[in-house]
């Protein structure tokens, strides 16, 4: 049980852990490349450790050292059949991206994971992979993991995805490495583009136009150095803390600000945040900056449309900010929140209501009428790391004590989160 009490002032500097999406992809592409890929500022969260474990189980030597991760790549066709099921733990990114890779191998495999993973929709990848000629099925016939995949040669397709999901897009692109001709994916709105950027960086031919990405099959991927930027999705909690807690100033160093991920910053500005980007730099194809935030009065906003994929993981903490803002905030077009690590619409409505907020669930999001004083409550996380961190921040700006059961689930994406908060 984590207990959070109100704070009168926060001050300090934080280097948030490496980006989760980029850390996963660095291990995966490193494994499929020729040579040794060196990754620095790798996220040592449980999700990324699941990715390492899965590739080790397929014969890839991966050294997880204190300051770097070294992936001894085996080439596009060098993975070995795993001895047992590949366990992705809680990680949807591992499950979906790995499925794309496994579909094109010359061996059969099974992907499994925890209770949350076994209830998340996999039909969204089974459909396009099947169109490519893959043999992939849900063991229980419910469209969820465990997934049984019999690797085989694949056909290139042009797939139009009904959801703006980087996991779906990346799954299809990775399968496209093993196809007989080019593969393209079109999505309704642009989702995070780390896979495209990193595939190009490793030597694949990838082109993007509007919301369509095309990849040519059979490249030789070459090992690279990857300096993972800080995760903007982890920085988001401290941005919110700096804005909400009185008399605060927080500097977040070296945060990734890729435009397909920076929707939170745009919404903060629209809400009236006092926020500056310093030392903007473009090393390794992923832009980064230091983010300085100070306590600010916030106003409600409407968040929807193409903005949603650029801040999908930040919506829980944005809902917390909205509860402290003046006026109404509408979050719409965000049905995807229902199929994340938990149903995040339900989790936000239940827990923010318990703290005294005025919040209503809608079909595709939520409406928050901000400005009511919040009080501490018993928070139910459903083992969802982003719900735990969002309410740790809410508790800093509420009255009384906020108790977060199973708060250690933050280790999925941010080991050391509570210590970082303490340091402020
Ligand atoms: C991720 C994509 C997002 C995000 C998840 C990580 C990725 O999911 O919510 O935390 O690394 O590709 P969707 O693309 O399915 O929305």
Image (cartoon, rainbow, N blue to C red):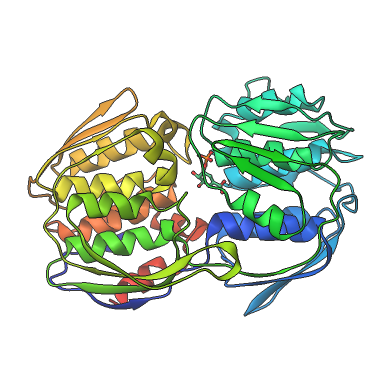
Residue 22: x and y, percent?
59, 58
Query: Which residue is at a point 14% across and 56% down the rendered structure image?
Result: 398
Left or right of residue 237, residue 88 in this image: right
Query: Which residue is at a point 36% across and 29% down the rendered structure image?
Result: 333
Residue 48: x and y, percent?
61, 58
Query: Which residue is at a point 64% across and 49% down the rendered structure image?
Result: 196
As drawn, 306 above or below 160: below
Looking at the picture, tell me which residue is in the foreground, 6 or 298: 298
Looking at the picture, tell me which residue is in the foreground, 243 or 45: 243
Q: Quadrant of the C terminus?
A: bottom left
Looking at the picture, tell me which residue is in the foreground, 180 or 250: 180
Can residue 294 be seen by looking at this rendering? yes
Left or right of residue 8, residue 171 in this image: right
What is the residue that sits farthest to the front in this orientation?
A: 209
What is the total number of numbered labels drawn onto the structure image? 0
Residue 72: x and y, percent?
82, 67
Q: Quadrant of the N terminus?
A: bottom left
Query: Which residue is at a point 61% across and 60% down the rendered structure image?
Result: 23
Residue 150: x and y, percent?
85, 32
Can residue 404 be seen by looking at this rendering? no
Quadrant of the rendered structure where residue 238 is? bottom left
Quadrant of the rendered structure where residue 129 is? top right
Left or right of residue 51, residue 318 in this image: left
Looking at the picture, tell me which residue is in the foreground, 35 or 248: 35
């Amino acid at each position: 049980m984590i207990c959070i009490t109100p704070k009168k002032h926060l001050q300090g500097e934080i280097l948030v852990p490496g980006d989760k999406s980029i850390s996963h992809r660095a291990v995966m592409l490193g494994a499929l490349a020729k040579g040794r890929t060196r990754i620095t500022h790798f996220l040592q969260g449980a999700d990324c450790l699941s990715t390492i474990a899965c590739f080790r189980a397929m014969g890839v030597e991966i050294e997880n050292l204190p300051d770097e991760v070294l992936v001894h790549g085996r080439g596009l066709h060098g993975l070995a059949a795993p001895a047992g099921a590949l366990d992705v733990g809680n990680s949807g990114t591992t499950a979906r991206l790995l499925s794309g890779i496994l579909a094109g191998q010359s061996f059969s495999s099974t992907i499994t994971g925890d209770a949350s993973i076994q209830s998340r929709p996999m039909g969204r990848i089974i459909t396009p992979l099947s169109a490519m000629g893959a043999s992939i099925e849900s063991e229980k016939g419910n469209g969820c993991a465990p997934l049984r995949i019999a690797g085989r040669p694949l056909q290139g397709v042009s797939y139009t995805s009904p959801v703006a999901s980087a996991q779906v897009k990346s799954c299809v692109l990775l399968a496209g490495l093993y196809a007989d001709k080019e593969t393209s994916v079109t999505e309704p709105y642009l989702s995070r583009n780390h896979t495209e950027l990193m595939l190009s960086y490793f030597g694949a031919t990838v082109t993007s136009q509007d919301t369509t990405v095309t990849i040519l099959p059979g490249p030789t991927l070459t090992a690279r150095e990857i300096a993972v930027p800080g995760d903007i999705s982890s920085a988001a909690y401290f941005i919110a803390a700096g804005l909400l807690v009185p008399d605060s100033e927080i500097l977040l160093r070296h945060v990734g600000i890729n435009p397909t991920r920076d929707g939170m910053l745009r919404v903060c500005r629209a809400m009236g945040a006092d926020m500056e980007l310093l030392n903007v730099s473009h090393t390794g194809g992923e832009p980064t900056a230091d983010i300085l935030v100070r306590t600010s009065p916030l106003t409600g906003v409407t968040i929807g449309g193409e903005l949603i994929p650029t801040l999908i993981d930040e919506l829980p903490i944005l809902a917390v900010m909205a509860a402290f803002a003046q006026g109404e905030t509408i979050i719409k077009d965000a049905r995807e929140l229902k199929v994340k690590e938990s149903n995040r619409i339900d989790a936000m409505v239940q827990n923010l209501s318990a703290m005294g907020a005025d919040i209503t669930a809608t079909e595709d999001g939520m409406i928050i009428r901000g400005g009511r004083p919040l009080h501490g409550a018993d928070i139910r996380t459903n083992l969802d790391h982003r719900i735990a961190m969002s309410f740790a921040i809410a508790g800093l700006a509420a009255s009384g004590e906020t108790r977060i059961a199973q708060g250690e689930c933050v280790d999925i994406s941010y080991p050391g989160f509570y210590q970082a908060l303490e340091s402020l």
